[in-house]
Image (spheres, helix red, strand yellow):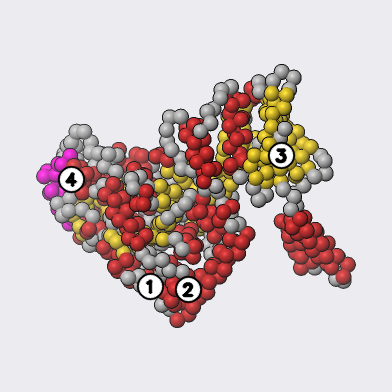
Amino acid sequence: MPQCLLSHKKYSYSHHDQKGPSQAIDVHDIVIKKSKTRVIVSYVGILIYLATAFYSLLVKEELSTSSFWSILVGVLFDRCLQYKPVKKESVVIMPTFGVQLETHCWSGRVIHRFVPIGKILRPVLNECVTPVTCYWSLALMLHGKEKLVLVFQELQPPVKMLVPVWKALCAATNGKEISSS
Amino acid sequence: MDERRRHRILMVSDFFYPNFGGVENHIYYLSQCLLKLGHKVVVMTHAYGKRSGIRYMTGGLKVYYVPWRPFIMQNTLPTFYLTLPIIRNIIVRERITVVHGHQAFSTLCHEALMHARTMGYKVVFTDHSLYGFADVGSIHMNKVLQFTLADVDQAICVSHTSKENTVLRSGILPEKVFVIPNAVDTAMFTPAPNRLSCDEIVIVVISRLVYRKGADLLVEVIPEVCRLFSNVRFIVGGDGPKRVRLEEMREKYSLQDRVDMLGAVPHAQVRSVLISGHIFLNSSLTEAFCIAILEAASCGLLTVSTRVGGVPEVLPDDMIVLAEPAPGDMVWAIRKAISMLPSIDPHVMHLRMKSLYSWHDVAKRTEIVYDHALQSSEKNLLQHLPRYLKCGTWAGKLFCLVMIVNFLLLHLLELWQPVESIEEVPDMLLVQHQDEEIEHDFSEARKKS
């Protein structure tokens, strides 16, 4: 039975165990909460882009530099307002076997990435800095690879939701129980 | 440490490691000593090449290398308002209480102090250099400084001369300016185990070979000293546009065997160059403080320096010979220094430097400045705006407008990203079982949220 353990304005976290062929499978889900406001804003963005493109291409007699600029601005504006197509991201931990990272889209499409347990050197909680903000991310360090593998590729859940997933990944990779405080 | 007195300081400057220099060293050593006193210190600077993101240095010093590329002379591109989101984010997530900016030439410092004041945080500014009043660059720099210091809580200067210069340039009240000299890591700069023989006297010069460091003076002084004293040799470390002139001088007077040009000397090797000499020569045309002569004195070298800026305040009279920045006077000073050499004991000099200068002392004095800053009255932006009007007839109004726009942008940002949505970062504790401690801190942070 899934338990909704943590909730946030934008995300909710749930964790449940499933019975696998030989041992329990640990599943951690981060679900993005559907927001009517964001959906409406997303459609407004599309409308603005279409209006800009229509005006530039059909109403104006000839294309000029300003037309290209207005189309470009329209595209950028639309991209910023676009509602993410991702509904949920899951981490399925199969002890002694591997970790499956799943991205579920609203359209029903599911993207799977599997990482064998032997390849994982260490799961790490990273603080990331961008020119405008800082956020936490959970990543896997792999043996022999320079690049980290992001556990949640599309979503940026808060750190309080990343910690239990990180603990579970550490337990699976270390093969020992981390005592809860 | 009493929780009430524990400060959480954000040091902001465009100049930090992996760059090496006076400002960089000051921020690093001061931060380390403040960490030892129990305060929390976070440094914010711009990214250096691939060095971008968050790094931890010795003692758990957290450094934010914000991915804003340097624009000119290691400075971030001045954008006025674009740095507001990231600075606000860092201040809130690290629960900063005091923002401490360094160096008047740092655009990131000025923007950070502006945003911190708009948010109502206490700000402290340290000026590390002397600037002029007459040229176009100085006039603009001084106007920017006037804007920043119009509403700063406290300011720090590295010498009394620097304090005078800062007060005159910015119009800040002298009562708000503290003088806290720089210090030197005497554990790193120790004299040679065995005293050098005085048969051949070695004069060491380590500086950037640029105009303001007096490289042109060296071109005049070195040949004259070599002519007067046959047993004197020079070691010149450093690089810069004036190196060509020194090379030409060496060729012209055939001084290849008496003047060694080492090129750029990494900071880790400065001590090994210093201990190969008897006298340290500083020919700067302007200096607010000059840490280089502290390093030389700590290594037991007698210093000959130009009497400029804050240099006379740095060392006692028996450790330094001062001269006017003119070739004749400097040659006289070198002659006097050579005659003083037999009475100089490098180890005694080193022990005196150890007692005179210490970064721990600088940190304790800076702590007092932070305490003063936190005691200053809490006022909202509207009550602070009249201070900006004093900056000039037109400039004052412009500065007020800049602050009002910043204030409005801050409120827009608070609607977009409320303070509650910014997660606070647990403090990093340096213990053996790091995973368990980090987990403990996150649990505490989760309970609070």
Whole-number angstrom distance, CA of label 1 to CA of label 2: 33 Å
Helix or strand or loop: what does disc 2 sit on?
Answer: helix
Question: What residue is rendered at 45% in x and 81% in y?
Answer: B393
Front tag of 1 and 4: 4
- Determine which residue is flagged by label 2: B382
Whole-percent x and y of residue B8? Answer: 41, 51
What amino acid is at disc 1?
Ala
Per the image, the residue denoted by label 3 is: A89
Front one among B322 and B3: B3
User: What is the chief secondary structure element of the magenta stretch?
Assistant: helix
Within 10 angstroms of label 4, few (less than 14), some, or many (20 or more) residues? some
Q: Are marks 4 and 2 on the same chain?
A: yes
Q: Position of residue B240 (x, y in %)?
A: 40, 52
**Residues behind callouts 1 and 2 on a single chain:** yes
Q: Chain ID for label 4?
A: B
Q: Amino acid at mark 3?
A: Glu
Residue range of the region highlighted in magenta in the rendering: B332-348
Q: Choose top left, top right, bottom left or bottom right for residue B324.
A: bottom left
Do the CB atoms of the residues marked 4 and 3 lie less than 8 Å apart? no
Q: Residues within 10 Å of mark 3 (few under 14, many from 20)?
A: many
